[in-house]
């Protein structure tokens, strides 16, 4: 069973785990909790 690498990257943050804010800095992606992976 190949379940380890089956998780897709989070669509909201493109797998980065955070958003780049317009005013500078970054914010953790609430959708994936900063992991960059999409929750099943």
Image: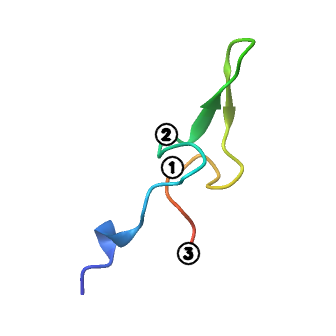
Quadrant of image for the N terminus: bottom left
Label 3 crowd (10 A; few <14 / some 14-19 / many >=20): few
**How far separated are the C-alphas under marks 3 and 1?**
13 Å
**Can you give x and y, in whole percent of width and height, for residue 31 in the image?**
68, 55
Marks 1 and 2, the one that precedes in the sequence:
2
Q: Which residue is drawn at 49% across and 39% down?
A: 16
Quadrant of image for the C terminus: bottom right
Residue, disc 2 = 16
**How far separated are the C-alphas under marks 2 and 3?**
17 Å
Identify the element where label 3 is drawn: loop
Residue, disc 3 = 40
Label 1 crowd (10 A; few <14 / some 14-19 / many >=20): many
Residue, disc 1 = 36
**Residue most extreme to the bottom:** 1
Residue 9, placed above or below residue 1: above
The image quarter containing residue 8 is bottom left
Q: Are marks 1 and 2 in contact (CB under 8 Å)?
A: yes
Identify the element where label 2 is drawn: loop
């Amino acid at each position: 069973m190949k379940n380890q690498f089956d998780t897709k990257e989070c669509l909201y943050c493109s797998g980065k785990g955070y958003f780049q804010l317009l005013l500078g800095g970054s914010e953790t992606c609430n959708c994936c909790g900063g992991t960059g992976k999409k929750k099943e």
